Every structure is written in C-alpha cells, then in structure tokens.
Amino acid sequence: MQKLFLIFLSIFMITLLQAKLIDYDIKPDWLKKNNYMGLTILDSKELEFDTYKNIKFREISALAFKNNILYGLNDKSKLFKFHLDIQKDKIVGLELEDVIKLKDKKDKKLIKINRDSEGMFIVGKKLIISFEKNPRVEIYSFDGKKIRAIPINKSLRDISDYVAPNKALESLAYNKKYHLVTAPELPLKGEKYHTLYSKKKQWKFKVNGSITALEFIDKNRILVLQRDFNYFTRRRETILSIVNLSKCKKKICKEKIVAIFKSSDGWHLDNFEGLTRISKNKFLMISDDNESLFQKTLLVLFKINNL
C-alpha cells in the first residue's frame, strides 16, 4: 500500500512540474501568415505553473539556453531550470526541474539590495548575471553560488548616473571578440542614444524603447530587444533590431530593424524582457508578468529570416 502511495505521489509531483502550455497567438487578426517583416513567428504559448517549493513562477526577466536546458531568471534572484522540448518548430514540453536561489560566496541568500537580477547568459559551465539597482555583473555556478564579480565599464558603476534605480543593467551578452557587452535599460543621464558598453569601449544607436535583452548572433552583430510598456494605458510595443558593432560612423552604429510589434496595430503582447538563442537563426523571448493578475507569461519561438 505504501509503495502504491509513493508511486502515486511521484506521478503527482511530476504532473505539478509540467508547465501548462496554452496556445496564444500574438499575431493580429489581419496578419494571416507567420512571416512578418524580417522574421517568422514559429510558435507562442502562455505559460502557467503551480507553485513549487512555495515559489511562484513569476516575473521572468532573462533566459539562457544550453543542451535542451532552458534557464529562466526572475528579478528576485530565483533561477528556474527547465527541460525544453521543441519538435517541428513547436514548443511541446517545458518541464520544471528545479528552482535555485542565488547565493553569495558564503552560501547565504543575497540581501535585498543585491537581488534585482535582470540579464543572463551562459559561458562554458557558468552563468553570467547582471543586476540593476546595485549595478554590477557577476559569475555564478549552475547551483546558484556566486564565484566572483566581473569589472564593468566605469561609466556604469554609479547608480546615480542612471535615469532611475530600476533603469540600470537590464541585459548583457558575450562573444569571444567583444567579451562582455551590457547596456542600461535607458540611456544614462545626459545621453540621447542607447549605448552598448564593453569594459573599455562604447557603441551608440538610436533609441526605439527600453533595452531589455541582448544576444550576439555572430562575430559583430548583436540582436537587441527593446520594449515600450505602459501598465496604466496598456500600450505595449516590442522592437527587435540588429546592431553591427563593426559598422559605426561618428560613433553611431548601423542598426537594422527586424520587427516592430505594436498593441495599437492589434498585436497581442506583454512585457517582453528575456531573449535567448536556441539555434543559428531561432530564438525564444519571454515576457515578465510583473506578478500581476492582468498580465501573462508568454513564451515566443521565432526565426530571423536571411540571417
């Protein structure tokens, strides 16, 4: 009897850890095809999870992907580990394997001022994470323990130089040529262009919204996710563009708009903040629901055409 109970309990727990994938078409009614501007929307889902270990799956602000494992990071320094199943360009499974709380070098949970985690990527067997209200970039192990800090551009170190405490290091990316590249959500005080920063260099481009995610797509080009989100007016805009760091004139870089989605045009959007590359030209982006009953966690799979 006890054995049967344990089997039932195991099946029950596995069921709890499976995401409920709800078909959710972000496209407006007038767009009959999946191709739009420079991309193809392959699939989109609304995600729902039951509470796990008293932790709710909410406010996801960053994604990172490796070996069919999708990591989601929320802005309270909780790391969600998923097994992702994509078949024939459709999201068919998302199983939550674990929830990990980021900790400091002494294996203690981060104090409140240090918990505002926003950007993430994977290098080798380590997670690189950016933080906002106390702007910094740090290296973590996959079990959530801090290894060390990474020096950032001196222009980014003082929170008083940002337009607001919650408009700091929302995103970051990495490749072997440029190493760590990050950006404030909005230009620093006195700046009129968005600026990407490595430790010693800067690249500027036009502001189309707030920068919420970055992802290198080759040696010189970086995919930028910008959003314009207003909680009160319900205005939602999502902009995807490619900035070529090797093509800059008078310190302004060449930018190519891949797609612009506007709720005013009928797109069914939310607060998109996370982005990760899963193959050569395919990406996932996710929305932060701000822990609001009126918002959704949306996961969108798309392909950039002619990349």
Image (cartoon, grey):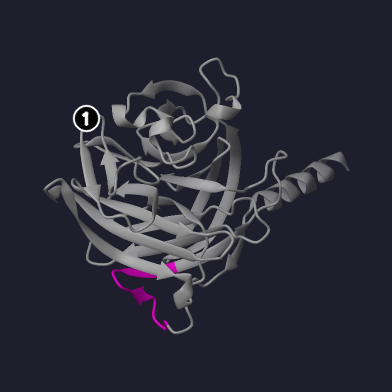
- Does residue 87 appear in the picture of this structure? no
- Considering depth in this image, is 92 or 24 the residue closer to the camera? 24
- Considering depth in this image, is 240 or 306 the residue closer to the camera? 240
In the rendered picture of this protein, how many numbered marks are placed on residues? Answer: 1
Q: Residue at x 42, y 67 (%)?
A: 88
Q: Residue at x 30, y 31 (%)?
A: 155
Q: Is residue 294 above or below residue 157?
A: below
Dividing the image into 4 quarters, which one contains the C terminus?
A: bottom left
Question: Residue 215 location in percent, x, y?
Answer: 32, 48
- Considering depth in this image, is 249 or 1 the residue closer to the camera? 249
Q: Is residue 108 above or below residue 67?
A: above
Residue beneath disc 1: 200
Residue at the farthest top position: 106
Question: Residue 283 location in percent, x, y?
Answer: 38, 57
Left or right of residue 228, residue 218 in this image: left
Residue at the farthest front position: 190
Question: Residue 219 location in percent, x, y?
Answer: 19, 45
Q: Is residue 169 above or below residue 139?
A: below
Residue 40 among those drawn in magenta? yes
Q: Residue at x 66, y 53 (%)?
A: 49
Q: Residues within 10 Å of mark 1 (few under 14, many from 20)?
A: few
- Considering depth in this image, is 219 or 158 the residue closer to the camera? 158
Dividing the image into 4 quarters, which one contains the N terminus?
A: top right
Please tell me whether mark 1 sits on a helix, a strand or a loop: loop
Residue 222 among those drawn in magenta? no
Left or right of residue 120, residue 257 in this image: left
Q: Quadrant of residue 52?
A: top right
- Does residue 151 appear in the picture of this structure? yes
Question: Residue 17 location in percent, x, y?
Answer: 66, 49
Residue stretch rendered in magenta on the structure: 31-42
Q: Amino acid at mark 1?
A: Lys
Residue at the farthest right position: 1
